[in-house]
Image (cartoon, rainbow, N blue to C red):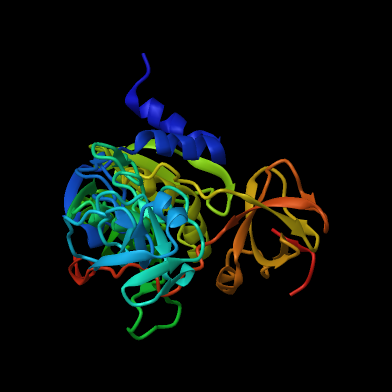
Amino acid sequence: MRSAAQDDDEVKLTVMSFEEARDRILSTVALMESESVEILDSLGRVTAEDVIAPLNLPSFDNSAMDGYAVRVADCNAFEALTITGNIPAGGSTTAELTRGSAIRIMTGAPIPHGCDAVVPLEETEDTGNHVQIHVAPHPGQHIRWAGEDVKLGETVLPAGTLIRVTAISMLASMGRTQVRVYRKPIVAILATGDELVEPGQPLPEGKLFNSNSPALAAAVCEAGAVPLILGVARDDREHLRQRITLGLQADALITAAGVSVGDCDFVRETLAGLGVKQLLGKVNMKPGKAMTFGVKDGKPVFSLPGNPVSAIITFEKMVRPALLKMMGHRQVTTPLVTAILQEELRKKPGKIFFARVRLKIAEGKFLAWSAGHQDTGFLKTMLQADALAVLPAERTSFSAGEEIDVHILSQAPGMLEPCPAEHLAELDSSPRTA
């Protein structure tokens, strides 16, 4: 009989394809529980209930134009119609059109009994007590009928709907002030390594600023979740154990660095010692081969490489889809689009490679160029990239003029959801070879 330790060892030794690894992660993570929030707070979140219309929309027959409420038959029978009233928007009426009459009506005002058309002002001439109709109307013209848009009892937002501005408009039109959505996971972020110094502190020789924590926190915010920055864990087993223990109290944990095979890479063994079941060893992708994934008590644990470029790309391709699934999204992976490569790219064989590229649009088509040096030590290339080109594992050379698949990166500076302070306190040459 195999032991659990043997199973774990096999996981560590197995190198999965990118697709297999992502599928394993997505099949493991579960939906968050739901909560009721104010409709403005629901923007970008996913409904956890069917929203049923409690009324018709429109709720009453109303005019779509400023004009005159008329009977179609009268517009051909009379040279001019007698004006017998005025119905403003927001008003109510018990008025009834009599033969040969017309009632002035504003946009949104209720349709009087007997009316079967509204004639716009610009198609009429007001002569005082009478109105002449210049263009004969047809039945139903410029009338919004009750229930024409939404009927009482209709499901207007099925569970699983991503709430955008138009959904908030619909909720408000239904009189709703709150809606039930899936909760945002709190995602703990832990950087590791004695070489790291927090930004704002003096930088001794041989040290590096910790860029992974703020970058990953921003990525978590952008995905719609809530980051909890845990600072830096030193290359000390006990300190690392304490910080990871704290991180496991969140809904998900992301660690950065310490997952390779160096003398001070203690993350894997520390996670195992704390009961995190490892479900993923190395991944046949670049950047990101050294990432691992595990779970404890249903909470996902993502261990990313420490290199900032590798951490960002691995988050984008592996962690973001998992967080989106936890928050109820149905579309969790970024659709690929086709671009025409404008220069030769080369890569080493054996791994799927995510090359950083710049994009332009010409004649309705995406054109792609390398964003710079593809070594993961070049962060500026990531800054200049518009997309990640998905270069298949089995190929090594990609020629100018051929079509490639690209994953367009988020381009929404200034649109990130603010990170709650209480969660942050605590706790060039071508071709270029990858």
Tell me which corner region of the image, top left, top right, bottom left or bottom right, holds residue 186: bottom left
Residue at (60% x, 49% y) in the render: 336
The answer to whether 165 appears left or right of 391 in the picture is: left
Residue 187 shows in the view:
yes
Residue sitting at x 80%, y 60%: 344
Residue 192 showing in the rendered view: no
Residue visible at 36% across and 68% down?
Answer: 66
Asked if residue 261 lies left or right of residue 247, the reply is: right
Q: Nearer the viewer, residue 377 or 236?
A: 377
| Quadrant housing the C terminus | bottom right
* Picture coordinates of residue 191, whole percent (x, y): 35, 62
Q: Residue furthest top?
A: 1
Residue 156: quadrant of the picture: top left
Horizontal and vertical percent position of residue 32:
25, 43
**Residue in the picture at 52% in, 64% down:** 309
Residue closer to the observer: 405 or 42: 42
Picture coordinates of residue 67, whole percent (x, y) = 37, 67
Query: Looking at the image, which residue sits at the far bottom?
Result: 202
Q: Residue 408 at what x, y percent from top left?
A: 58, 59
Instruction: Please state which of residues 165 and 18 is positioned toward the viewer in this rendering.
Output: 165
Image quadrant occupied by the N terminus: top left
Q: Is residue 323 left or right of residue 333?
A: left
Name which quarter of the figure residue 100 lies in: bottom left
Q: How many marks?
A: 0
